[in-house]
């Protein structure tokens, strides 16, 4: 049996970010003489989409988000003046940044979809009581998109993520000669790292509320060298209630 060496979750900010986990996965594939297809069709698709996304950053959706032409500059300036007027003498006035919320979910096709919305958009049933920080925001979840196009506010789209299965598989149930679940474990770490890195990058320009975050279940396993590794054996998306970043 060909055995992937596990890579534990090192947080979303290891040197290199998501590419740290991707590099580990490719080293293991090379060491074992395997191809991406040996991970399974869904995992192969996740890896291909993730590589495309990493190579295209910051991407069109990010550029449209921070474009000054889409921002309600007068509203941001008014909020900054309000904060300045309320600030205590000698205290620095925080810059007024556009407020957004980030939504992440896995759809029925097992695809991970991450989109941004003006703050309060989803909680209000897509009809905020107050004007947002963006002019002419078009909710393409409602109005749809042209055939073959993705929504303007879509920041990340990875096919097949919901099909990743890092759970331990009993040897007697595995008939493919590979501990594929460890490869899936490494890959879901890369996906989470990419998502959380995206949120951190957005927080440099915007006031971000995260509606969903990743959760991991980890178990201690022994690698071939006898070292203990806390491997990811389960994952999910959980509601955060709009925690600010």
Image (spheres, rainbow, N blue to C red):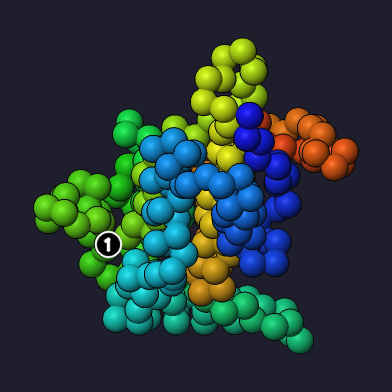
One can see residue 166 in this view = no
Q: Decide if residue 139 is on the left or right side of residue 197.
A: left
Quadrant where the C terminus is found in the figure: bottom right
156 with respect to 191 (left or right): left
Q: Is residue 77 above or below residue 14?
A: below
Residue 244: percent from left, percent from top: 59, 56
Q: Residue at x 64, y 67 (%)?
A: 16
Q: Is residue 22 shown to the viewer in this render? A: yes
Q: Check the image and report above or below for 196 versus 5.
A: below
Point 70% across, 83% down: residue = 92
Residue name at image x 57 percent, y 14 percent: 173
Residue 126 is left or right of residue 54, and the answer is left
Residue 202: x %, y % from top left: 51, 67
Residue at 23% over, 59% down: 138
Question: In this view of the protein, which residue sits in the foreground, 120 or 12?
Answer: 12
Residue located farthest toward the bottom when viewing the structure as drawn = 90
Is 4 placed above or below 219 here?
below
Which quarter shows the N terminus? top right
Callout 1: SS: loop
Q: Residues within 10 Å of mark 1 (few under 14, many from 20)?
A: some
- Residue 34 left/right relative to 66: right
Q: Nearer the viewer, residue 110 or 6?
A: 6
Quarter of the rendering containing residue 110: top left
Q: In the orientation shown, which residue stands out farthest toward the left?
A: 147
- x and y, in percent, of residue 49 in the image: 39, 54
Judged from this view, the residue extending furthest toward the right is 226
**Would you name the residue on which mark 1 appears?**
152
Res 26 quadrant in image: bottom right
Q: Position of residue 70 (x, y in %)?
A: 30, 75
Q: Nearer the viewer, residue 174 or 146?
A: 174
């Amino acid at each position: 049996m060909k055995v992937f060496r596990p890579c534990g979750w090192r947080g979303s900010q290891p040197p290199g970010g998501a590419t740290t986990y991707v590099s580990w996965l490719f080293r293991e594939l090379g060491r074992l003489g395997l191809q991406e297809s040996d991970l399974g069709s869904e995992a192969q698709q996740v890896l291909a989409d993730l590589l495309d996304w990493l190579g295209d950053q910051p991407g069109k959706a990010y550029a449209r988000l921070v474009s000054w032409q889409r921002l309600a500059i007068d509203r941001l300036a008014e909020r900054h003046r309000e904060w300045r007027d309320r600030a205590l003498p000698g205290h620095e006035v925080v810059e007024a940044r556009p407020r957004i919320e980030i939504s992440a979910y896995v759809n029925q096709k097992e695809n991970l979809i991450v989109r941004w919305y003006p703050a309060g958009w989803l909680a209000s049933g897509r009809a905020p009581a107050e004007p947002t920080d963006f002019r002419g925001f078009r909710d393409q979840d409602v109005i749809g998109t042209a055939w073959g196009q993705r929504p303007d506010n879509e920041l990340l789209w990875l096919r097949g993520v919901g099909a990743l299965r890092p759970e331990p598989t009993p040897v007697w149930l595995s008939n493919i000669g590979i501990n594929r679940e460890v490869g899936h474990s490494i890959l879901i770490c890369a996906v989470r790292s990419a998502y959380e890195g995206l949120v951190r990058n957005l927080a440099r320009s915007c006031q971000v509320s995260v509606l969903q975050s990743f959760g991991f279940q980890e178990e201690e396993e022994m690698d071939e060298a006898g070292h203990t590794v806390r491997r990811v054996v389960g994952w999910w998306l959980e509601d955060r209630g709009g925690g600010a970043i």
